Amino acid sequence: MNFDIITLFPEMFDSIMNTSIIGRAQQKGLLNLSFHNIREFSSNKHKQVDDYSYGGGSGMVLMPQPLFDCFNYLEKRHGGRLPKVIYFTPQGKVLNQSMAQDMALEEELVLLCGHYEGIDQRVLDKYVDIELSIGDYILTGGELAAAVFIDCIARLVPGVLGNPDAHLEESFSNNLLEYPHYTRPAIYENYEVPEVLLSGNHEKIMKWRKRESLRNTFIKRPELLENTKLTQEEQKFLDSLNTEN
Ligand code: ADE
């Protein structure tokens, strides 16, 4: 999967993208990140990239020229057709796992990170396909949002996670939160691992995990259950939690 990242601060990505699973994915060639520094596209002799907002108000706006030139350059590099362009902004649709799964099917994406007050609207009108937010709060720029996005998409790319089934059972698959995990020792400071997990009975373990997954979701994120398909037995268990509470 290839990402072109347009940013004023490529160095913000250094440690996050070169560590652990994402770092290894790049070394294996499963993930390619190309950073494009907006300032390098400025035709201004002082390499200016931002200016005052027409109409007044505080905060600077990223000028059209460096960004138009950057997109032109990327278009040429991609043989005349830009991949989908995502702009990170609190005004965008809020990213969730199901959107991430769809986007992981793309082979290449261009990620545009704003900074300061925003980007001249003409850039967004001409080039942006999707506006994405990572939550209803305001960051100083789109870089952290883009890093979160890359991390979340890259781990869905085949070969990036050691175990190809790893995301089948994780939180948000089937709209449920995951069940609790335990490792050795079986007893630690009087806290015991649930007996069923030591039983070796896979059917019972699967059933326990499904129930705990339902319980976790019911307690922590009950609104997710509105969009979850349940078997009759699972529904019955959920009803029993409802009457308990
Ligand atoms: N830029 C600033 N805040 C943001 C957010 N919450 N999500 C995505 N991009 C942003």
Image (cartoon, rainbow, N blue to C red):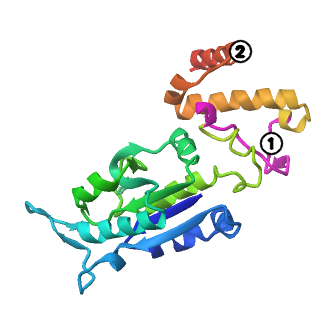
Numbered range of the magenta stretch: 173-195
- Tell me the tag on residue 233: 2
Callout 1 amino acid: Glu
**Residue extending farthest right:** 200
Alpha-carbon neighbours of circle 2 within 10 Å: few (<14), some, or many (≥20)? few
- Could you say which quadrant of the image residue 44 lies in? bottom left
Is the C-beta separation of discs 1 and 2 under 8 Å?
A: no
From the image, which quarter does the C terminus lie in?
top right
Query: In percent of the image, x 59 and y 37: which residue is there?
Result: 172
Above or below, comparing residue 222 to residue 38 in the picture = above
Query: How far is the residue under mark 1 from the one under mark 2?
Result: 28 Å
| Disc 2 C-beta below 8 A from ligand 1 | no
Is 125 left or right of 212, judged from the image as shown? left
Q: x, y (%) of residue 145?
A: 44, 57
The overriding secondary structure of the stretch rendered in magenta is loop
Alpha-carbon neighbours of circle 1 within 10 Å: few (<14), some, or many (≥20)? few
User: Disc 1 vs disc 2: which is toward the camera?
Assistant: 2
Of mark 1 and mark 2, the one earlier in the sequence is 1
Tell which quarter ligand 1 is in. Answer: bottom left
Residue pointed to by mark 1: 192
**Residue extending farthest left:** 55
- Could you say which quadrant of the image residue 74 lies in? bottom left
Q: x, y (%) of residue 81?
A: 44, 57
Disc 1 element = strand
* Residue 242 sits inside the magenta stretch: no
Callout 2 amino acid: Glu
Above or below, comparing residue 193 to residue 24 in the picture = above
Q: Nearer the viewer, residue 77 or 190?
A: 77
